[in-house]
Image (cartoon, grey):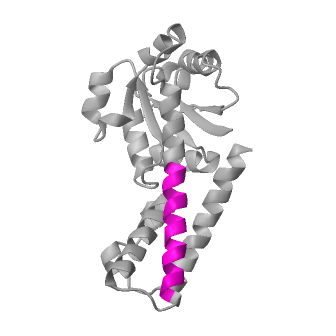
Amino acid sequence: MYKLLYIDEDQEQIENFLDYIDGTNMNSIFKVITKLPCGDIEEMISEIIKINPDVIVSDFLLNENIGALGYNVPYNGVELVEEFLNIRHKFPCFVLTAKDKDAVSDSEDVNLVYTKSLMTTEIADSKAKVKFTDRLLNQIEHYRARIANAQEELIHLLELRKNGSVDFEIEKRIIDLDDILEKSIDATHSIPSEFKAFSNTERLDVILSKVDELIKKLDENDK
């Protein structure tokens, strides 16, 4: 079972999303965790990291119902997920909105934004070819495969290096894979590729250990 974090300031919209997951019979696939937006984006990012979801779905306008919240939210869903993507590259993130033009204009990646009408349409049309829930699953699986494949290739290349069977291109690929895995864990503390020395085995061992921990957490979320 995958952990899906849904962020919205409107309780009615939260209930609508839960009804959508229920209506698409995806309760056995997604464990939905709902969260109100925090008043500070850094605090919200910290909460997301603590929850450790497999996918994030956020409403676009997080400040429309501040009367119920009791505080201001000085960021929108696009700004939130883009901030999180600065920490974990390629992480599965989606923004739902009834005002897609505004959301798209705010986003550097238009593929992050989806209209809320998709949800009501899918429940009414069970034959819809590509459902929003399918997109969620595909992004989760693609993200996991990207990490697992990079780790597998890196382990293989490190074995070649131990046997002395490497050249410049392989060393460069080792650094590229190290970069991919590092940014999947925490891009804020990653070292730019141009500053990484070749044959830094100790550093790569640390990265692989962290990736092992990440993969174990991902696997634990499935159970």
Q: Is residue 192 left or right of residue 181?
A: left
Check the image and report above or below for 155 versus 47: below
**Quadrant in which the N terminus is drawn:** top right
Q: Does the magenta stretch mainly form a helix, a strand or a loop? A: helix
Instruction: Identify which residue is drawn at 51% across, 80% down.
Output: 158
Residue 158 magenta-drawn? yes
Q: For the view shown, which residue lies furthest in the bottom direction?
A: 164
Check the image and report above or below for 65 versus 206: above
Check the image and report above or below for 79 versus 99: below
Bounds of the magenta segment: 143-161
Q: Quadrant of residue 180?
A: bottom left
Instruction: Identify which residue is drawn at 48% across, 41% down.
Output: 139
* Image spot of residue 74 (x, y percent): 39, 36
Q: How many marks overall?
A: 0
Observer-nearest of 149 and 118: 149
Q: Is residue 36 left or right of residue 60?
A: right
Instruction: Identify which residue is drawn at 34% across, 72% down.
Output: 192
* Image spot of residue 44 (x, y percent): 52, 43
* Image spot of residue 107 (x, y percent): 30, 37
Q: For the view shown, which residue lies furthest in the top direction?
A: 124
* Image spot of residue 201 (x, y percent): 51, 85
Q: For the view shown, which residue lies furthest in the right direction?
A: 223
Q: Is residue 72 left or right of residue 70?
A: left
